[in-house]
Image: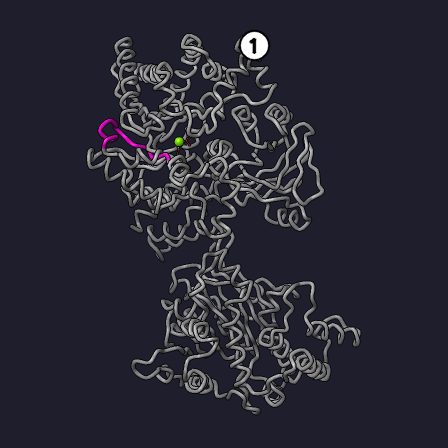
Amino acid sequence: MFEPESTKTSPGEKRYIYSFAGGCADGDASMKNLLGGKGANLAEMAIIGLPVPPGFTISTAVCTWFYDHQKTFPENLFERDIPKALGNIEGVLGKRFGDPENPLLLSVRSGARTSMPGMMDTILNLGLNTDTVEGLARKSGNPRFAWDCYRRFVQMYGDVVLDLKPSDKKQIDPFEAILEAKKHELGIKLDTGFSVEDLKDLVSRYKVAILEKTGRTFPEDPCEQLLGAIGAVFNSWNNERAIVYRRLNHIPDYWGTACNIQAMVFGNMGSDSGTGVAFTRDAANGDNIFYGEFLMNAQGEDVVAGIRTPLKIEQLKQDNPKIYAQLDDIRSILEKHYRDMMDIEFTIESNRLFMLQCRVGKRTGMAAIKIAVDMVKEGLIDENEAIMRIEPEQLNQLLRPVFDLKEKQVAIGEGRLLATGLNAGPGAATGRICFNAADAADVFKQGEAVILVRIETSPEDIRGMAVSEGVLTERGGMTSHAALVARQMGKVCVVGCGALSIDYQKGELRVEGNDLVLRDGDYLSIDGTTGEVIAGKVPTRNPEIIEVLIDKTLKPEDAPIWALYNQLMEWADRCRKLSIRTNADQPDQAENAISFGAEGIGLCRTEHMFFGGDKIDAMREMILADDIEGRKAALDKLLPVQREDFYGLFKAMGSRPVTIRLLDPPLHEFLPHTVSEIEALAGKIGKSVEAVTARIDDLHECNPMLGLRGCRLGILHPEIPAMQVRAIIEAACRMKHEGHEVVPEIMVPLVSTVKELEVTSEIIHKTARDVIAAQGIDIRYLVGTMIEVPRAALTSAAIARAADFFSYGTNDLTQMGLGMSRDDSGQFLPAYQQQEIFDCSPFESIDIDGVGRMLDISVQEGRSVKPDLKLGICGEQGGDPATIEFCHKTGLNYVSCSPFRVPIARLAAARAALQC
Ligand code: PEP
Ligand code: MG
């Protein structure tokens, strides 16, 4: 019998080998770092009594040793430890490695801590040579099978260990060439047409090829074969594919791979043998059904290669009820043991079932939620574990329109993928190209879907964005105007797609390195989750949760997916400590956010309230006024508009808190740019084109992001905040009159010194007092400030004395903290990420070490003065799970994000509370 003791090293000596066989093992599932995922789970399956072919795992520590010592192995490994471990296998099976009568054959496989599918190497049927192949033929009674194994082994060994596999797809594998030539000679199409003699001939031709190409003979000695194969597995940790995969998946180089050596079992031994893969539940939709495929008389690679079409696992129930029942038992044993959905590989050898692998199964967002909620009901996991099983970003798959995956693959296969930009607003959109808002409105009126394509967006584009399915821009970063507004509207959005070249005059879109010219009205598809831009139409579908919550076209009782989502959200809300607010400046955005569970508005950007309709003209008239009279006249026009807007927002939010920020318009985003825009505006505000042009020149700023914006505007022109505060308090009075108490939170932007806040606060209080006195209604309100300038963050104790609350504007804090323009970062951030200067954009996920540090200092300073100071975040990072975890740890009261990210934020806040 197998004895784990036998592979133990002497006391004090490092252990490199871990054996496993029926009923016991040296390792277990908790040892993934040392044994790799595959090795750890093989050990675990052996412990719980599943039929695992006996074997052993050479630990990842050997891989590290190998690279640290000029690709050599630790002392005693080959001389003592491996022979001992091999002896275990031989003892269990009654076969011997290299024995010409009854040979033990081995599989040698890689296996890192996390799965790196197909990236590293595997060698099967190891131990075969001219003698043992005859032994296998006699033992199995099937010479054809034995020689087929040998043929496959020589090919695999040649490719993987002797490095004959071509490095690029254009070259031909020498063994494939020989195989094809042989088929051609025989006039056959399939490998099954080879006789024993043909296979023998192939083996000798392969060996000749090896000698010719490497100058070495094929190794007949099984021990030499094993040494070569183990080296090849460790070498494959650093092949190009594996390195690229590690970079993409943030897997550190130092982990190394383990090497699993196991007795071969054969699914290709005849019609009572086979192989298959399965999931213990449906990995696509999470249904609690056994989901898998198998092939009889085949090896694992045949299932993967897709040469023959595998059968559904239900078929096995009919073909071999005994084996099916055993597998089904294993399915429930594994689920109960791991308390998760598992992905398994199995082989049937002469009617005997063997488990070759199990691991936690990858799943879609939909399946993740269904499985987690079902497993709570089944008593396998508790609610907290269910929350921890779902990555917040996975919710996007249930909240956003998606492409039909097959259709998208077809489109990409047809070479229609044009370029990739920044994935600024997730989801999938397809429609006709429109290059301006007016065309978009027309096309929309005709009942057609629109993709608005702009070099960059400005307020003019808002009505075009509103009617579009998606927005695509050539320039801009993740917090550019287009990105911010699109996310808030719930639009699919790709920005900063530098490969595009847009010609408004010609109505044309060209793409770098592509001859295709797309014109006005042509179909275009964009994937805001991946940033892909695809020519032509790709069908999309709206998810059920949106039909219930936003479109209101489906009743909750008819929506099982919504029910799962709702259950998960209830659990999440029970454990989170952070409140979730939204960034919204229109009543419909506020309503969407409430449907998603928002508890208040964390940021209403009042300058955005002028987007759409003719409101922008009065706003521009105000900006362009030459003197205070002109400005007051424009403000008089704006007052009723603002009052109505605030009233609409308060009504939508009910008794929930609403933070309204005083005007903060970076001028370049609001002034007209083109001659026709200037002409149109001049006509509307009754000025000459020359006068308007001259005033625009006067107002020109070299760096508008750091110019006359934020509180500076109100300090220079107090009549502007006065008008806004009047509108806010009057709207609150109207609400109170109607029986609803609202406590507006008035927020001052871009403060860097406490003095700025004090001066602005005086204007606010004076106006509020006047309105309250005039209306005879008492309104409570708060005055707080954005903390978005580094100086403000670092002097927060002083600022807190003058503030009822702080809201962290991490867009500007990042821009100023890193000295990195939010509008221009799209040009260099992708390269920065590629070169690993940043893991991800600091405009998407807070830069914890820098911006986060400023935030920490500010929180401490602020609360040292006012322990109950209300703190929130309203920069775009507020919807990012890692940032939310940081905000939880830092002790903020709430995060505020765009409406469609509210569910993601709820889940992320719950996970943060459970983790910290
Ligand atoms: C910020 O700077 O983070 C912020 C929310 O303000 P805005 O994006 O409007 O500049
Ligand atoms: Mg800001």
Query: SS class of the residue under badge 1?
Result: loop
Q: Is residue 819 above or below residue 736?
A: below
* Viewer-nearest residue: 544 or 572: 572
Please provide percent x and percent y for residue 612: 51, 21
In depth, the one of 224 and 583 nearer the eye is 224
Residue stretch in magenta = 798-809
Describe residue 259's horizontal placement relative to residue 678 as left or right.
left
Q: Position of residue 724 (x, y in %)?
A: 37, 17
Is residue 683 at all visible to an observer of this figure? yes
Circle 1 packing at 10 Å, graded few (<14), some (14-19), many (20+), is some
Q: State how many labels appear.
A: 1
Q: Position of residue 385 (x, y in %)?
A: 35, 53
Q: Quadrant of the N terminus?
A: bottom left
Residue 602 sits in quarter: top left
Q: Foreground: 775 or 241?
A: 241
Mark 1: C-beta under 8 Å from nearest atom of ligand 1: no
The answer to which image quadrant residue 342 occupies is: bottom left
- Image quadrant of ligand 1 equals top left
Q: Quadrant of residue 841?
A: top left
- Which residue reaches farthest bottom? 101
Residue at (43, 24) in percent of width and height: 665
Q: Is residue 9 left or right of residue 231?
A: left
Residue drawn at x 25%, y 20% as measured from the top left: 780
* 567 over 235 or under it: above or below: above
Q: Amino acid at mark 1?
A: Ser
Q: Is residue 478 above or below residue 379?
A: above
The x, y position of residue 686, in whole percent, is: 54, 8
Q: Which residue is mark 1?
A: 688
- In terms of depth relative to the viewer, which is nearer, 437 or 313? 437
691 in relation to 145, above or below: above
